[in-house]
Each structure stands twice: as structure tokens, then as C-alpha cells.
């Protein structure tokens, strides 16, 4: 009950406006000639695709590292796992599993280095995280050209080397979770498999935050001096949280790919952090507080708006303003979170 | 500390440690120039063009650094204001120098309003100005798109059909600035050893440099430095801290708008939805390459930075092609280096800030022991 109360307290006016806006879109949709079932299924699919990427924000926010603008680093680990799995020619579910397995060591190594760096720059994490993300994406652009992959489905046809910008996951792990146990009612499709997969991870994080290490992590986030006084190794805990965030980012992009159907390389991970950051903020999180319910509510609201605005707007005023609305809503949300007074004191 | 200064070798070492980024870039360029195979005349000519194109933009970053607000990622706001001015003058069909002046006049009030708003928001986010100004850039980009893509041609009348999208409103992706292309550069053109030097542009850049030097000595400039050093002390001394900080951002935004107009008159075409988005990153990277940091920058850093950064930009695709046979690799390399430089500078700044904080604590403790 306390949790519900605090959630409402944390909701704030921007979230209420966004929620009402989405509700309005759903009400208007049938009159605009948009099929409600299809739009709902689209919202569900996109929710499933993005929620683990949003979940990747949680550990770092808990340990006081701020919003994880360095999410591209996790995504890169995931991409490395995905490409290696395809290179080894696994098919079906094993290919997805192996992608996860291959991605894990990269995520741990990158996350560890990234966490060690963030420990050196306490207080300025977010700006540095942004640029660590950017620099690593640009660095990997070179690597995608240089790593000697040979699978003909991945490399450029005419030269035989260098990875393509988009690689289809068809024949590998396309819709491996989306189609698993999915329920179809008329136009409405519910990707239960993807939800279950997310639930697994969400429960894992939820349970973890209640273990001894998890509590220590929250303590480090809310008061580092107190945490140190009670014998917690602050730097180590922060590194652990960064590794977890990076790994979740890696898993998140794999889930995204299996539903989307393509592995996007090169510059595509560049701006992937911003939607995830704004989603969790829309869900009611702040720079130093986030919960699983923030993730679920935020992803649903954000992705809901992304799916509903193009279709509804298009049929109402015959223009697609969704991109502009997305930019204004998501960045406005981040700005709102950055300028809130109670957090500025940290 | 005295021992450290004593020998020349240690002095040199310290110089190397204090200026890692410019030195690294000199090395990259020294290796890259022979690899690229460009002639010296070509390179000097290119650098001259790029200096005239970018110097004004990069100079606009200096004033917020004096005021302790870090790198102004919100300079894209000014760039957008400049672009709105340019779209309007090409709609009215004005050409040449008058067009540039008019565009600058139009951009000024827009820049002032946006700069004031940006400064207000940054005052609410003290201590994380940079990440906030960075997000403001994105946010205002959304508003800019809303205005230019939906407002122009519907709410704001645009008569020139070459500018408007086929659907009847909104500006096309590229706006041809043929009427004012290089009008400032060609006003006073000097040819030296076969290298074109756009003298008029350089005169304007020199005037801005003089302005910055003069500005530092004015009351407002001194206030800014006091605020940059320590906000609380400045407040105690009776300086209006918030107002001073807003002013620094407003001035920077206005100059960024002018800089963008100079930049685009040299390029000759305006990418309506892309030109501004990269300009902040490249200008900041150039400034940092010149040896500036988040807290300290001067005019020398600007010019050294532009020369080194753009030298790398010119040579890296060819160097990549000649080295590995892939020009694309050089492209990615320069993107990587731009972001890498900003990352390294930010990390160094944070580490230095922490170290200074610790040293201050130690000095304080030592003082107390003595007492």
C-alpha cells in the first residue's frame, strides 16, 4: 500500500499529462478509423522489445550512478554476442541462447572497465557516460569492418568482408520469443513469451535488490558516506551495478532484435540510450530512484505514444508528426528530471 | 612541488602531462599527413577555408567557460536561430552581404530568447550544466522541427515555392543559399602563394577575438570569472550569480547564431534538419583538441584546435584508404577520435576536480593542525 502511495506521489504532472494523452489517443483511435486491436498488439510488441533495455537503467540508478546514458556499451556487447552466434551458425533457440552466452563475457569486461571509469568521475557520471557510449559506438564501427567474420549472410556480398549495416535474424532467432506461447484474439496478439522473458529478468532484479548485496547497492546510492561507514565497499558495489546494467543492455538488444528481425550495426546504437532513459523517467523514476513498476509503466506509456501517435495523427490530420512529438516528449522528460530541485542537491 | 619544477626534464614531462590532447593530435597528424599523400599547399588552403568557416562558432563557446558553466552544448540553439534567419532571407530573395546582415538581425532576438531560456534551465540544474545543455539541444531540436516542418508555410507565410515541400507547407531538406554563397568570403579575397585567403571573414573573426579580450575586462566579464571561480563567494560579494550565468549563455547563443550564418555562407547549402545537430559536437571537440579544458580556455586554444582537428578530418579518409584500403575506416576513425577526445577531456576534468577537492581538504586539515 505504501508503495502505491509513493508511486502516486512520485507520479508528477508530466506523467499524468502523458498518461492522459495516451488514454485520449486510445479513445480517439476507433473514431479515426484505427483498429484498436492492431494498435494494442503493436504497443504490446514494442513494449516487449524495449522493456529489458529500460530495465537496464535500474541497477545504475540504484547505486547512484545516475541515468545510464552509456547504454550503447551494453548494446555493443549484445551485438558482439549476436554476430558471434550467427558466425557459429547456430539456428533456432540455441542461436538466441548462444548469443546471450557470447554476449555475457563482453558485457562483464566492458561493464567492469566502464564502472571503474565512472568511479573516477563521481558526480559527473551522466555526461561521461554519454560520451563513453558514443566513443565506443564509433570505435566498434571500425571493428565491424575489421573483425574477420565469414558467414555470407553477414558480410558484404561483393567484397566478402566487413559486416553489413543490417543483418536479418531470419533463420536464426527471428521471433523466437515473440511467437512462443503468443495468444491471438482477432486482431489482438499478445506476445506472452516475450512478456514471460521480461518477467523473469524483472523478478530477478526485484529479488536481487532485496538480497544483502542489493540492499548494499541501494545504500550506496542513497548515501555513500553512510554506506562506507557501515563497511560496504562503495566502489565495488558501483562496479557491480554497472556490470549488471551493461549486461541487461546486452540481453535487451537481443530481445529487441528477435522481435524486430534485424541486427543493426554501425551507428544505430548511437541514440538508443535516450528512448530508454526517457521511458523510465516517464514511468516515475528520478535520477536516484527507480523501481520495476517504473520500468513497466514507463515503457508502456512511452511505447504506447510512439505507436499510437503516427496512426491516429495520420488519419486525423494527414501528417505524421510522431517523430517531432517523440523528440519533444522524450527530451522534455529528461530535462524535467534533470532540473528537479530535490535531486539537484545530490 | 618546488623539486618538481627544478629540472628541465621534469618541466617537459609536466608540459606533456598538462597538454596530452594537443600533443596526441600533433602525433596523429604527423603520422597521417605522409600517409594521406596530400600536398602542403592543398592542406594549407583547406585549413584556411576551415578556419574561416569554423572559428566564429568555436569562439562562441569561450564565454560560458569563463562563467564556469562548462562546455556549452546548447550552442546548437544559436545555430538553429541562425538557420531560421537564413530560411527567411532566402524566402524573401535577398542576396549578398545584405542577406547575411539581415539573417543575423533576425537570428538575434531568437537567440536571445532561447539563450535566456537555456540559462534559466541551467540555473535549475547547477552542477550538471553540461548534460542538461546537451539535452536542451535535443529538446529544442524537436521544437525547431515542429516550427520549420509544420509552422513554415502554414502559420508563417513562405512564398518561395522552391523552399516549400510539395505538400504545401514545411521547408525542404536542403535550402540552396546560392544568393549568398561565399559572399563574405569573396568580399576581400587575398591570394597568397596560390592559397585563397578570405580576408573579410578573418577580419570579422579578429573583431570577435578583440571583443572577447575586451569583454573579459568589463564589469560583466569580471563578474563572470568570479562566478566561475566560486559561486558562493561571488554571491557574497554582491554579484547577481544567476543573472550573470544567464548572460553568459545568451551571449554565447547569439554568437553561435552569427557563427552558423558565416559557416553556412561558406558551405552554400543548408541542410534544414541536420546542419545544426553536428555543429555543437565538432566545435566542442575542436576546442578541446586545442588544449582547452572544461574550466579553462583561451583564444589560442580555438585556433590551434581548429587547425589540428580539421587537419585530422581532412587526412583521415585518405590515410585510411592508403593504409588499409578502406576510406570508410578513416571516416569512422575521425568520428571515434572526435568523441574520444571529448570523453578523455571530460574524464580528466572530473579527475582533476576531485583531486583539487581532496587537496583543499588536506590543506584545510594542515591549517587546523597548525592552529
Image: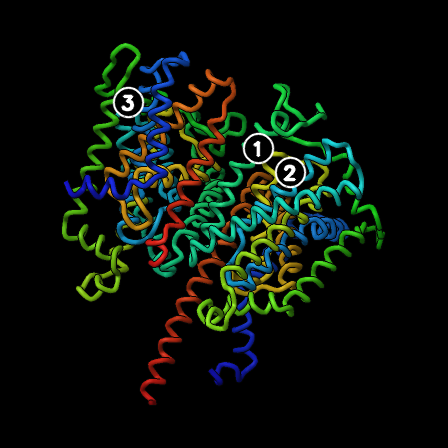
**Do tags 1 and 2 sit on the same chain?**
yes
Q: Secondary structure at mark 1?
A: helix
Badge number at residue A178? 3
First in sequence, mark 1 or 2: give its number.
2
The alpha-carbon separation of the residues under discs 3 and 2 comes to: 45 Å
- Label pair 1/2, CB-CB below 8 angstroms: yes
Whether residue A198 sits left or right of residue B361 in the image: it is left
| Classed neighbour count for the residue bearing mark 2: other residues with Cα under 10 Å, few (<14), some (14–19), many (≥20) | many
- 10 Å crowding of disc 3: few (<14), some (14-19), many (20+): many
SS type, badge 3: loop
**Is A272 drawn above or below residue B365 in the view shown?**
above
Badges 1 and 3, same chain: no
Which residue corresponds to mark 1?
A: B147
**Across the whole image, how many numbered discs are drawn on residues?**
3
From the viewer's perspective, is the residue at label 1 or at label 3 nearer?
1
| Relative height, residue B311 to residue B142 (above, below) | below
Question: Residue A99 or B196: which is nearer the viewer?
Answer: B196
- Residue A211: x %, y % from top left: 14, 49
Q: Position of residue B312 (x, y in %)?
A: 62, 51
Q: Name the image quarter holding residue A283.
A: top left
Residue A82 in percent (x, y) is at: 35, 33
Residue farthest to the top? Answer: A186
- The chain letter for the residue carrying disc 2 is B
Placement of A296 over or under B123, stated as above or below? above
A187 left or right of B135 in image: left
Amino acid at each position: 500500500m505504501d508503495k502505491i502511495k509513493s508511486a502516486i506521489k512520485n507520479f508528477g504532472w508530466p506523467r499524468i499529462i502523458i498518461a492522459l494523452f495516451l488514454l485520449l489517443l486510445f479513445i480517439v483511435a476507433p473514431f479515426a478509423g484505427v483498429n484498436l486491436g492492431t494498435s494494442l498488439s503493436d504497443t504490446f510488441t514494442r513494449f516487449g522489445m524495449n522493456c529489458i533495455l529500460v530495465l537496464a537503467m535500474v541497477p545504475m540508478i540504484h547505486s547512484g550512478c545516475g541515468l545510464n546514458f552509456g547504454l550503447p556499451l551494453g548494446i555493443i556487447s549484445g551485438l558482439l554476442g549476436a554476430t558471434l552466434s550467427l558466425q557459429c551458425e547456430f539456428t533456432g533457440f540455441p542461436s538466441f541462447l548462444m548469443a546471450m552466452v557470447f554476449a555475457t563475457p563482453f558485457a562483464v569486461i566492458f561493464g567492469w572497465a566502464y564502472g571503474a571509469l565512472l568511479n573516477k568521475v563521481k558526480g559527473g557520471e551522466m555526461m561521461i557516460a554519454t560520451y563513453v557510449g558514443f566513443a565506443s559506438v564509433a570505435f566498434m564501427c571500425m571493428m565491424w569492418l575489421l573483425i574477420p567474420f565469414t558467414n555470407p549472410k553477414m558480410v558484404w556480398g561483393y567484397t566478402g568482408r566487413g559486416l553489413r549495416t543490417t543483418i536479418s535474424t531470419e533463420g536464426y532467432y527471428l521471433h523466437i520469443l515473440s511467437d512462443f506461447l503468443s495468444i491471438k484474439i482477432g486482431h489482438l496478439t499478445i506476445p506472452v513469451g516475450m512478456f514471460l522473458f521480461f518477467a523473469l529478468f524483472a523478478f530477478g532484479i526485484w529479488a536481487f535488490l532485496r538480497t544483502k548485496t542489493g540492499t548494499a547497492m541501494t545504500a550506496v546510492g542513497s548515501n555513500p558516506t553512510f554506506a562506507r561507514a557501515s563497511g560496504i565497499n562503495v566502489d565495488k558495489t558501483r562496479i557491480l551495478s554497472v556490470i549488471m546494467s551493461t549486461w541487461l543492455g546486452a540481453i535487451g538488444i537481443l530481445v529487441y532484435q528477435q522481435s524486430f528481425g534485424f541486427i543493426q550495426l554501425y551507428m544505430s546504437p548511437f541514440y538508443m540510450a535516450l528512448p530508454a532513459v526517457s521511458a523510465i523517467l516517464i514511468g516515475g523514476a528520478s535520477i536516484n530512484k527507480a523501481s520495476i513498476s517504473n520500468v513497466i509503466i514507463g515503457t508502456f506509456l512511452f511505447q504506447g505514444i510512439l505507436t499510437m501517435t503516427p496512426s491516429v495523427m495520420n488519419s486525423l490530420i494527414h501528417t505524421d508528426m510522431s517523430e517531432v512529438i517523440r523528440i519533444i516528449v522524450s527530451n522534455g522528460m529528461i530535462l524535467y528530471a534533470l532540473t528537479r530541485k530535490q535531486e539537484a542537491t545530490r | 612541488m618546488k623539486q618538481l619544477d627544478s629540472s628541465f626534464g621534469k618541466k617537459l614531462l609536466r608540459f606533456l602531462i598538462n597538454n596530452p590532447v594537443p600533443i596526441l593530435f600533433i602525433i596523429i597528424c604527423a603520422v597521417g599527413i605522409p600517409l594521406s599523400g596530400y600536398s602542403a599547399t592543398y592542406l594549407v588552403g583547406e585549413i584556411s577555408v576551415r578556419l574561416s568557416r569554423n572559428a566564429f562558432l568555436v569562439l562562441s563557446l569561450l564565454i560560458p567557460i569563463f562563467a564556469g558553466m562548462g562546455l556549452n552544448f546548447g550552442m546548437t540553439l544559436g545555430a538553429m536561430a541562425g538557420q531560421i534567419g537564413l530560411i527567411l532571407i532566402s524566402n524573401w530573395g535577398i542576396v549578398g552581404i545584405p542577406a547575411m546582415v539581415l539573417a543575423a538581425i533576425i537570428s538575434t532576438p531568437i537567440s536571445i530568447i532561447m539563450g535566456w531560456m537555456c540559462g534559466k534551465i541551467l540555473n535549475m540544474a547547477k552542477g550538471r550544466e553540461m548534460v542538461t545543455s546537451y539535452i536542451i539541444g535535443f529538446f529544442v531540436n524537436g521544437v525547431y522541427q515542429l516550427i520549420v516542418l509544420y509552422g513554415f508555410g502554414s502559420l508563417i507565410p513562405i512564398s518561395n515555392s522552391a523552399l516549400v515541400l510539395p505538400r504545401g507547407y514545411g521547408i525542404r531538406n536542403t535550402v540552396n543559399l546560392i544568393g549568398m554563397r561565399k559572399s563574405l568570403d569573396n568580399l576581400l579575397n587575398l591570394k597568397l602563394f596560390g592559397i585563397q585567403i578570405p580576408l573579410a571573414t578573418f577580419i570579422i573573426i579578429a573583431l570577435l577575438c578583440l571583443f572577447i579580450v575586451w569583454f573579459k575586462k568589463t564589469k560583466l566579464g569580471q563578474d563572470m570569472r568570479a562566478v566561475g571561480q566560486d559561486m558562493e563567494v561571488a554571491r557574497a560579494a554582491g554579484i547577481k550569480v544567476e543573472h550573470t550565468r544567464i548572460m553568459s549563455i545568451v551571449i554565447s547563443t547569439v554568437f553561435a547564431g552569427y557563427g552558423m550564418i558565416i559557416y553556412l555562407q561558406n558551405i552554400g547549402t543548408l541542410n534544414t534538419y541536420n546542419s545544426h545537430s553536428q555543429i555543437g559536437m565538432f566545435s566542442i571537440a575542436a576546442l578541446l583538441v586545442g588544449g582547452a579544458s572544461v574550466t579553462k580556455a583561451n583564444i589560442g586554444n580555438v585556433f590551434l584546435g581548429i587547425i589540428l582537428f580539421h587537419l585530422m578530418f581532412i587526412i583521415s579518409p585518405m590515410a585510411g584508404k592508403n593504409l588499409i584500403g578502406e576510406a570508410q575506416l578513416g571516416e569512422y576513425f575521425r568520428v571515434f577520435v572526435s568523441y574520444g577526445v571529448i570523453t578523455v577531456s571530460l574524464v580528466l576534468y572530473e579527475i582533476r576536480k576531485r583531486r583539487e577537492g581532496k587537496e583543499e581538504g588536506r590543506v584545510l586539515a594542515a591549517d587546523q593542525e597548525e592552529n
